[in-house]
Image (cartoon, rainbow, N blue to C red):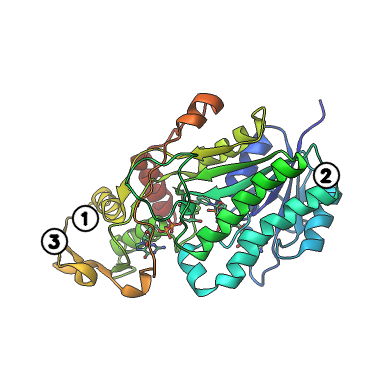
Amino acid sequence: MKKKIALIFGITGQDGSYLAELLLKKNYIIHGVKRRSSSANTERIDHLFDSVNFSNKNFFIHYGDISDGTSTLNIINKVKPDEIYNLAAQSHVRVSFDIPEYTADVTAIGALRILEALRILRLKKTKYYQASSSEMYGLLEKKKSLNELTPFHPRSVYGISKVFAFHAAVHYREAYGIFASNGILFNHESPRRGPTFVTKKIVQGLVRIKKGLQKKLTLGNLYAVRDWGHAKDYATSMWKILQYKKPDNWVIATNKETTVKEFANRVAKKLGFKIKWKGKGIYEKAINLDNNKTIIDIDKKFLRPTEVDFLRGDFSKAKRLLKWKPAYNTDDLIEDMISSELEDF
Ligand code: NAP
Ligand code: G4F
């Protein structure tokens, strides 16, 4: 049987690396797009290919950038993939307050460039996956589990850009018959998570404190609620979304909520710290009861001008129709992140 060909934009990122592993196991030929950078940015995928020659027999890397429409179209035309996964984005919400125009160009218009390439090249059989985000929901009227019908009210240019890309996928589906699906993924983490996202920052920080390499961990809003799953589970959902009989929008989540503070408490406990919180607002801090020193404090530079206070996803549609459900719960995720962090010592 002819092997399926997948083209992954964002292959060097957390999700791209897990998706590439999954698709290689499923006997796909993988083409990935990598940005040029002055230092190595392939550490998450180096185990999958020959990083000097940029290939193995089922794995090929192309230089590209979704802010460059011509190269994006050329790569798609050359590869003529069965499936395109658009995971490429300026994916950091806080950073999107600092570089809004760039974020919109990559995260919103980048998705449009891929869809336009599909339209211009008339690649009607190529399926398109858009990495949509729970960040699109933003400001909520009520704290409840969010589903495919919940309206969007984004709270950052990142969220606005994802709403644009979401609707672009729906529009190209309706206007041109392109198989374009949205995975509305809630937060998902792993040992490969970028170091400035809060889960990785907490795990890395507290492990380093344990090892005597760092004095304290400084965070922002402790009371934001997130629905945290494992990126490995979420990569499986992306593939399932494109195997479904028709294009659609899908919520992928765990339907469990945890605050940033609870997440930090659980990591601290698993590492054997005894901590006590005191103070309020930006003066709140956690004391390490073994030495009476501050182990976690707050700095307002990590707060956002507007925050998404609450995210919890109802994934019942994906469970029913895609037969997808998460294998990892939040505790399993924390265990995996801690044990991987400890392996580095
Ligand atoms: P990530 O680790 O930040 O990876 C983003 C990827 O996009 C990286 O490979 C990055 O390349 C690439 N990229 C950035 N700008 C690009 C450009 N102009 N052209 C081509 N590639 C570019 O993010 P992730 O956590 O894997 O998330 C994957 C996707 O899902 C993103 O679109 C994100 O917004 C979305 N999402 C993530 C979550 C989550 O909780 N993780 C939830 C919902 C949606 P470099 O390696 O060179 O930086
Ligand atoms: O880890 P975060 O930066 O993730 P955030 O903003 O929820 O965005 C992630 O999930 C989205 C899906 O909902 C993705 F679309 C997006 O690409 C990204 O992967 O922050 C989580 C929460 C926020 O409420 C933030 O204010 O943690 C709070 N927080 C508290 N202290 C912090 C910190 N966030 C970061 N990054 N750093 C802190 O020190």
Residue 75, picture quadrant: bottom right
Q: Is residue 50 left or right of residue 164?
A: right
**Where's residue 151, x and y in %?**
47, 47
Question: Are circles 2 and 1 on residues that touch, CB within 8 Å?
Answer: no
Q: Front-most of 36 and 312? A: 312
Question: Are circles 2 and 3 on residues that touch, CB within 8 Å?
Answer: no
Q: Tell me which image quadrant ligand 1 sits in.
A: bottom right
Considering the image in quadrants, where does the C terminus appear?
bottom left
Q: Give, as a three-letter code, the residue at label 2.
A: Lys
Upstream in sequence: badge 2 or badge 3 = 2
Query: Relative to 92, is 248 above or below?
Result: above
Residue that carries the numbered disc 2 in the rendered image: 80
Q: Front-most of 202 and 167? A: 167
Q: Front-most of 39 and 210? A: 39
Upstream in sequence: badge 3 or badge 1 = 1
Q: CA distance from mark 2 to mark 3?
A: 59 Å
Query: Relative to 67, is 61 above or below?
Result: above
Q: Secondary structure at mark 3?
A: loop
Residue that carries the numbered disc 3 in the rendered image: 289
Q: Give, as a three-letter code, the residue at label 3.
A: Leu
Residue that carries the numbered disc 1 in the rendered image: 273
Q: CA distance from mark 3 to mark 1?
A: 8 Å
Q: Give, as a three-letter code, the residue at label 1.
A: Phe
